[in-house]
Amino acid sequence: MSSPTFTMSLLSLFLFSLFVLIAQAQVPANQTFTLVNEGEFGPYVVEYFGDYRMLPEIFSSPFQLGFYNTTPNAFTLALRMGLTRSESLMRWVWEANRGNPVGENATFSLGTDGNLVLADADGRVAWQTNTTNKGVVGFTLLPTGNMVLFDAKGNFIWQSFDYPTDTLLVGQSLRAGGVSKLVSRASEKENKDGPYSLVLEPKGLFLYYKSIISKKSLLYSQFTNIQQGTLDDVTLNSATDDGFVWDLSLLSSGGNDLYLDRPKFNGTLTYLRLGIDGNIKLYTYYGQVDSWEQTFTLFDRDSNFETECQLPERCGSFGVCEDNQCVACPTSNGLSGWSKTCAPEKLTSCKANSFHYYKVEGVDHFLSKYNRGSATKEVDCGKKCSSDCKCLGYFYNRDTSRCLIAYELKTLTKVANSTHVGFIKAPNH
Ligand SMILES: *[C@@H]1O[C@H](CO)[C@@H](O)[C@H](O)[C@H]1NC(C)=O
Ligand SMILES: *[C@@H]1O[C@H](CO)[C@@H](O)[C@H](O)[C@H]1NC(C)=O
Ligand SMILES: *[C@@H]1O[C@H](CO)[C@@H](O)[C@H](O)[C@H]1NC(C)=O
Ligand SMILES: *[C@@H]1O[C@H](CO)[C@@H](O)[C@H](O)[C@H]1NC(C)=O
Ligand SMILES: *[C@@H]1O[C@H](CO)[C@@H](O)[C@H](O)[C@H]1NC(C)=O
């Protein structure tokens, strides 16, 4: 490895805690990390705890860089937001090495070659900025939460804002030709890619659910859908005219801006997150009162955009959703009360004589809203599902004669019109 100027060791001391910071000392908000010779630690205070070497936290109020783990000895290098005096209010807003955690004694170092590297104790590189020999002279964390590597002229050679995972901070963008999507986290425990993505496309911002069975990304919502021109970028923005009234929006260079909400106070410290459940929420931190407010929710009972019933997994693996609630579990014996255990019956075989269908009236599939399906006769829709082993059921709209083949059942949305029917495969016993 090239000469490290700062090295962070993961302390077993902290391994028991869920979210840990790696060092105790603070550096001034605008402290920059400059290249120094190996063995020197330049401007930093180095603390020793037993045999472990620690380095000051990289800090720019209210952002801090640190490591966290949600499973033992699997650490993610991440930025968190909030004031240190209220540990429970910390939120992780950017991360380097999703899906590729490091263990104890991992090192995080900026080499004299200008490459920022996160490596395991055995030298395995888990993550790097790929900025070798690009003129990098220093590293800093800006008060916006953007972590940058800069050259002698102060140009940013690399910035964390260009690499979002599931979160956008104010000033951060998705762009065509760069990172153009957010991908959800798999679960609270597992920090790897989940099934949901928010994708910037020429005609809008679209939400997809990746089916495990079909491997396809299925459209479940359109956050924005533009009529004029193309969408080349979106940037989370917080603005005020008078310092009192703030607006949160997604701005685009082509002028297709989307207003989101009005926070109570200064909205500068806001982030947008694509959650584990596929919902999009904005959270705003009010530094003066040290508290967070949920400032926007895309799928919500009060939303102008979508209800919760449009979330693919609102009702878990199966259920009928009405007015934001899971109200029924469809079974071959009719509808029963919904609970988390509601699931379609397991099929034993895909031979035509091994299953039958049962009918659920007055429902749409969660995909029906944005996928028109094919124009087919009802009987042919059924045949299509029967001949497809992966098909778990089909949904037919008798008004429009549209057929939707379902590889995932999940949430069915209740509709007033009984001309919308679902047919669910069930095994013959
Ligand atoms: C860092 O901040 C201090 C006080 O906030 C200021 O005096 C100094 O000029 C700043 N340095 C840089 C490099 O921005
Ligand atoms: C971490 O470093 C300490 C001190 O050098 C050592 O005792 C320990 O075995 C190391 N752990 C791993 C997993 O390398
Ligand atoms: C660095 O390059 C590797 C290999 O091409 C790539 O997988 C990784 O995403 C790059 N890192 C960044 C931060 O772009
Ligand atoms: C809003 O908050 C940001 C971040 O704390 C701060 O830098 C900015 O000065 C504030 N703006 C106003 C008008 O209060
Ligand atoms: C069902 O849809 C048909 C055709 O679109 C319409 O004529 C009818 O009024 C609808 N019924 C209800 C209860 O909405």
Image (tube, grey):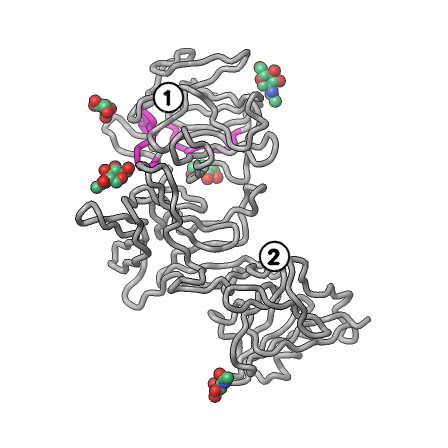
Q: Which is nearer the eye, 216 or 292?
A: 292
Q: Which residues are magenta?
A: 125-146
Mark 1 belongs to which amino acid?
Gln
Q: Which is nearer the eye, 262 or 130?
A: 262
Q: Mark 1: give few (<14), some (14-19) or many (20+) Cα within 10 Å.
A: some
Quadrant of picture, ligand 3: top left
Q: Which mark is residue 212?
A: 2
Q: Secondary structure at mark 1?
A: loop
Residue 144 sits inside the magenta stretch:
yes
The residue pinned by badge 1 equals 26
Mark 2 belongs to which amino acid?
Ile
Q: Secondary structure at mark 2?
A: loop
Q: Residue furthest right?
A: 429
120 lies above or below 265: above
Percent x, y for residue 65? 42, 30
207 lies above or below 4: below
Label located before the other in sequence (1 or 2): 1
Q: Mark 2: give few (<14), some (14-19) or many (20+) Cα within 10 Å.
A: few
Residue 78 sits inside the magenta stretch:
no
Q: Quadrant of residue 25?
A: top left
What residue lies at 27% left-to-right and 44% top-to-bottom?
Answer: 266
Horizontal placement of 295 versus 331: left or right?
Answer: left
